[in-house]
């Protein structure tokens, strides 16, 4: 009996020590986020989902973090992932339902949005233009309101949605049509 009690106490202390010894990583400086359209809980009418990381300015300037004319992953860390649950159109180009990577090339007063067939990629390092499904150039608008954290949001528009993106004083909207 004493052996059983001793064994139980020893096993408990061993497990307790291992639990306390576990180290957890700190919070990511650019946390991952997900948005869906529509945002209701029902999965039957979903049109799109975006998985992206949200960098913060922390006193830095957007133009130094995302220079004009340079390919950008639309966030931080892994490249931004777009999933379409229905066939959609962007700039009159049909995009079949599926998963894609979103990239952008900012320029003065405009931004080129790229939908690329490669998925599960880090940053822009493995980007290949031949994998582009389509590109669209949209106005890049400067506003007074400062947005500290890179953000994305969907807005219902007619027979589709607009994907809004903003960071710092810059905003852009990308029109998707069903």
Image: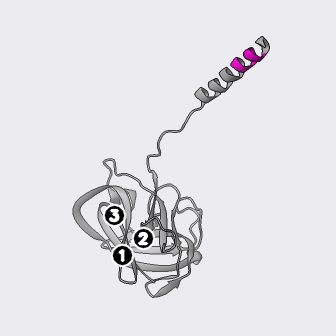
Any magenta on residue 5? yes
Contact (CB < 8 A) between labels 1 and 2?
yes
Indicate the quadrant where residue 162 lies: bottom left
Q: Is residue 48 left or right of residue 130?
A: left
Q: Position of residue 92 (x, y in %)?
A: 45, 88
Q: Which residue appears at 33% of the width and 71% of the height?
A: 172
Q: Is residue 136 left or right of residue 5?
A: left
Q: Which residues are magenta?
A: 4-9
Label 3 vs label 2, nearer the camera? 2
Q: Quadrant of the C terminus?
A: bottom left
User: For mark 1, what is the residue?
Assistant: 156
Q: CA distance from mark 1 to mark 3?
A: 17 Å
Q: What is the secondary structure assignment of the residue under circle 3? A: strand
Which label belongs to residue 78? none
User: For mark 3, what is the residue?
Assistant: 166
Q: Is residue 6 left or right of residue 70?
A: right
Indicate the quadrant where residue 174 lies: bottom left
User: Counting residues from the N terminus, which is met first, the one under dot 3 or under dot 2?
Assistant: 2
Q: Position of residue 149 (x, y in %)?
A: 35, 54
Q: Position of residue 83 (x, y in %)?
A: 53, 70
Compared to residue 164, the image places residue 137 above or below, namely below
Compared to residue 30, the image places residue 114 above or below, namely below
Q: Farthest residue in the bottom direction?
A: 92
Contact (CB < 8 A) between labels 3 and 2?
no
Q: Position of residue 81 (x, y in %)?
A: 52, 65
Q: Which residue appears at 45% of the width and 51% of the height?
A: 31
User: For mark 2, what is the residue?
Assistant: 38
């Amino acid at each position: 009996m004493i052996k059983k009690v001793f064994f139980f106490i020893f096993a408990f202390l061993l497990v307790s020590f291992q639990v306390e010894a576990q180290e957890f990583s700190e919070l990511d400086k650019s946390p991952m986020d997900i948005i869906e359209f529509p945002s209701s809980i029902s999965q039957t009418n979903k049109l799109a989902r975006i998985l992206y990381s949200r960098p913060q300015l922390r006193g830095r300037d957007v133009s130094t973090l995302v220079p004009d004319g340079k390919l950008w992953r639309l966030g931080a860390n892994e490249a931004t992932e777009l999933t379409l649950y229905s066939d959609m159109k962007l700039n009159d180009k049909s995009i079949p339902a599926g998963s894609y990577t979103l990239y952008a090339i900012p320029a003065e007063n405009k931004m080129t949005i790229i939908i690329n067939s490669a998925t599960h990629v880090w940053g822009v390092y493995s980007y290949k233009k031949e994998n582009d499904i389509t590109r669209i150039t949209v106005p890049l608008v400067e506003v007074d309101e400062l947005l500290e954290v890179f953000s994305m949001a969907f807005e219902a528009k007619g027979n589709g949605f607009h994907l809004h993106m903003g960071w710092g004083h810059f905003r852009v909207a990308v029109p998707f049509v069903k």
